[in-house]
Amino acid sequence: MDIYQVIIRPILFSGLRADPEWIHQQTMSIFRNLEQAPSWAQAKLEQSLCLTDVRLEQTLWGVKFPNPVGLAAGFDKDGVAAGIWGLLGFGYAELGTVTLQAQLGNPRPRLFRLPADKAALNRMGFNNRGAAAMATELAQLKSSSRKIPIGINLGKSKVTPIEEAAVDYLGSFRTLLDWGDYFVINVSSPNTIGLRSLQSTDQLSAIVDALQQDNIAQKPLLVKIAPDLEWEAIAQVLDVAKKYQLAGIIATNTTISRENLKTQIIKTTGKDIREEAGGISGAPLRERSTEVIRFIWQHTQGRLPIIGVGGIFTPVDAWEKITAGASLIQVYTGWTYEGPWVVRRILEGLLLKLEEQGLASISEAVGRQHLH
């Protein structure tokens, strides 16, 4: 157990006054200020939290990832700490979700911890300062601070009608094109009315077609899907991915399922959890997201890169998703529960797994479950 789990987390998680969104905002302020910290302080941070090993490196879409553990979208919505994530051990960071229009998101409270389930419930609603503001942030980022690849997660503005979604996504894509190493079309958040309908073949095709036609720079485009889709619907998304030569799939977003939760009542609101709108992240999502990864790998014969996200807390969780077919993985809820040292612990655990299996690199472990 590290200092975070013994001392810091109990303070952050205790009492009704510990509003998760307020804590998140304070944390982001700290991270943003770290970029101005003295070089010796940054070096100490890097020494403590980072792990470099050639066996963890991969190149996907012509982009070099120093390790497979990334920060999931939702944590740094506006890219204000984009220069710091590499110092915290991440192999890449996904910024956003960002929308073309700045928006406040849904009414508060909209973020809840479920400690009994090692989970969180959120209905943030894509609160962010807009694509232009993120572009300004990234333009100011020092080139020396850009240590890791940056992905940008794109969502639909709430004020934009569903039938105009493609134009909305395209606007954000054009605004941020120079700053992302890869881009994600997020059509799977449960917290914007009608958004998940964009996962249908016709709707998704229109969005992907618009972006690919404009994608002269050939930036990698991925789609992030919901864990609640039926297998047939996932297969249809994969057909779209093949038709439009998408770079990969992110599996998965949060779930609207409330099955098998230990938490029944949200303490801060006093409501039954089934009455609280929003998506569940964390441990309850682990098994389903891995099942989706396996399905995608099998359906595409391992030809379509997958970023696996959902319920990763330990090296075992990470290894399971990688061997199921994920080339890269992402953490968010697990990072908030386990603390900043969890990235290094996962990487150390992955190296042990490679040694146990006699593998020379993490890429050799991708999809290994399917070889048996």
Image: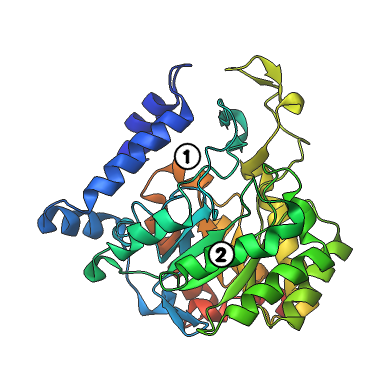
Label located before the other in sequence (2 or 1): 2
Residue 120: image quadrant is top right
Depth check: give the residue in front, 301 or 139. Answer: 139
Which quadrant does the C terminus fall into? bottom right
* Element on which disc 2 rests: helix
- Where's residue 279, x and y in %? 67, 40
Q: Is residue 239 visible?
A: yes
Res. 98 mark: none
Note whether 358 is above or below 37 in the view shown.
below
Q: Count all numbered tags in the image, as a single digit.
A: 2
**Location of residue 108 (image quadrant):** top right
Marks 2 and 1 close (CB-CB < 8 Å): no
How far, Cα to Cα, is label 2 from label 1? 35 Å
| Residue type for callout 1 | Tyr
Q: Position of residue 356 (x, y in %)?
A: 51, 72
Q: Nearer the viewer, residue 209 or 119?
A: 209
User: In percent of the image, x 35 and y 51: which residue is there?
Assistant: 80
Q: Of 349 and 71, which appears nearest the observer?
A: 71
Image quarter of the N terminus: top left
| Mark number displayed over residue 337 | 1
| Relative to 107, residue 309 above or below | below
Circle 2 sits on which residue? 171
Residue 23 versus residue 265 in the image, above or below: below
The local secondary structure at tag 1 comes to helix
> Measuring 85% from the left and 63% from the top, which residue is drawn there?
233
Residue 313: x %, y % from top left: 52, 49
Q: How is colour applied across the structure in the image?
A: rainbow
Amino acid on which disc 2 is placed:
Gly
Tell me: 132 left or right of 226: left
Q: Determine the residue located farthest toward the right in the rendered image.
A: 232
Q: Nearer the viewer, mark 2 or mark 1?
A: 2
